[in-house]
Amino acid sequence: MVFEFFGDKKKVIIAMAHIGALPGSPNYDPKGGVSKLIDDVMEDIRALQEGGVDAIMFGNENDRPYELKAPPEGIAAMTAIVQAAKAELKIPFGVNYLWDPTASVAIGAATGASFVREIFTGVFASDMGIWAPDCATPARLRAKLGRTDMKMLFNINAEFAHSLDQRPIELRAKSAVFSSLADAILVSGPLTGQPVDQSGLRKVCEAVTDVPVFANTGVNKDNVTGILSCASGVVIGTHFKYEGNTWNKVEPARVKRFMDVVSTIR
């Protein structure tokens, strides 16, 4: 069992529901407004659920260029969108406000999410500048809000960034569980949609045995068998989109083909 809210499912598939650009970000569509953002993400949710994924994770990948601290208008809009869209959900859901772990926990707690994902630990040189997350603040916020049941998924090697921590990735993963109470460890590739290094993923899986380990980027129907031979599950977004383009809509046929492969594994 990965988490209680997955029941007896093994090798779980968490699919991304990428919300369009939020208010305040350069690509926001003021004519369509928040109502269009809700309609668009609900269309993707329907395709993902019909395809048989195990959970949905809401993310604001379209808010480029990214900020390290979520603005109030972004938090408010994402909360409203998730709250509206969850009426469509029949499976567990999570949230991730890039790249702000405290905002992610706040939105997740307010909307009833089962989990949140973010960079909670480490120090990085990134496209957004020097990045030093503060794990204690979101962890304490989760406790204050009475949501210790909401799992915190730690992405330990961020996209668009290079870790300044010289320790091997498996040691950083093990340390995050010990020192910062990670509920799961996520291993990413260098960019959104690019595969994880499977040798590094396997080292993390071997080092971390008391919480689930997920591949966080670049999973597709051709590599998922190898990835799930050690990982507890995957987070997948880009591969489910038309033409495998992160910024396109979800293609139902791609979801079904992928889940058909997964069904042979579990």
Image (cartoon, rainbow, N blue to C red):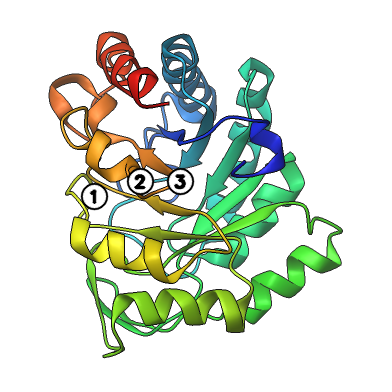
Between circles 3 and 2, the one closer to the viewer is: 3
Q: Which residue is mark 1?
A: 192
- Whole-angstrom CA distance, mark 3 to mark 2, is 24 Å
- Depicted 1 relative to depicted 132: above or below: above
Q: Which mark is residue 101?
A: none
Q: Are marks 3 and 2 in contact (CB under 8 Å)?
A: no
Q: Are marks 1 and 2 in contact (CB under 8 Å)?
A: yes
Of mark 1 and mark 2, the one earlier in the sequence is 2
Viewer-side label of 3, 1:
3
Three-letter amino acid code of the residue under disc 3: Ser
Could you say where residue 183 lies in the image, as x and y percent from the top left?
A: 61, 61
Q: Residue at x 54, y 31 (%)?
A: 55
Q: Position of residue 219 (x, y in %)?
A: 25, 39
Check disc 3 and report its element: helix, strand or loop.
loop
Q: Which residue carries the number 2 mark?
A: 61
Dot 3: few (<14), some (14–19), or many (≥20) neighbours within 10 Å? many
Find the distance from the CA under tag 1 to the CA under tag 2. Answer: 9 Å
Q: Which residue is mark 3?
A: 232
Q: Is residue 74 visible?
A: yes
As measured in the structure, the alpha-carbon distance from the residue carrying label 3 to the one carrying label 1 is 20 Å
Q: Earlier in the sequence, mark 3 or mark 2?
A: 2
